[in-house]
Amino acid sequence: QVQLAESGGGLVQAGGSLRLSCAASGRTFSPYTIGWFRQAPGKEREWVAAITWRSFAKFYSDSVKGRFTLSRDKAMNTVLLQMDSLKPEDTAIYYCAATPSLVDFRGPSDYNYWGQGTQVTVAS
């Protein structure tokens, strides 16, 4: 069992930056792929990015590629999502999730564990 907790959301002006954290408890991230999703009001949950903990392979959706960056803090068992050049359309609740799959990680149904989410609001 993995418990996930996101933090770091908030309100920022367009063009600004935020850094989200996803901390794991219960067990380490070692066998998992950690994904970030977001969901705006009235829209489906959208895959944003994913990182495989062991090989440190990183993947990004086209909508955030070049603006968002994944990293990890192994000692703290934490995945970080640095979000730069934020746009109003990035406004959503952001969730981190964990899956044992190294291949299927772009859909919400691929994930076994979810955090509670953190709100990101980008003002124009």
Image (spheres, rainbow, N blue to C red):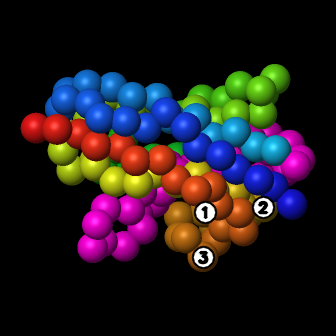
Kind of element beneath mark 2? loop
Quadrant in which the N terminus is drawn: bottom right
Give the residues drawn in magenta, as a range. 26-55
The percent coordinates of residue 81 (x first, y second) are 51, 35
Query: In 3D space, how far apart are the residues under numbered discs 1 and 2 (Cα atoms)?
Result: 9 Å
The verdict on residue 99 being magenta is no
22 to 98, vertically: above or below: above
Label 3 environment density (alpha carbons within 10 Å; few <14, some 14–19, many ≥20): few
Residue type for callout 1: Phe
The verdict on residue 36 being magenta is yes
Q: Are marks 3 and 2 in contact (CB under 8 Å)?
A: no
Residue type for callout 2: Pro
Residue at image mark 1: 105
Query: In 3D space, how far apart are the residues under numbered discs 3 and 2 (Cα atoms)?
Result: 12 Å
| Quadrant in the rendering for residue 84 | top left
- Tell me, for residue 109, which label it has, or none: 3
Q: Residue furthest left?
A: 124
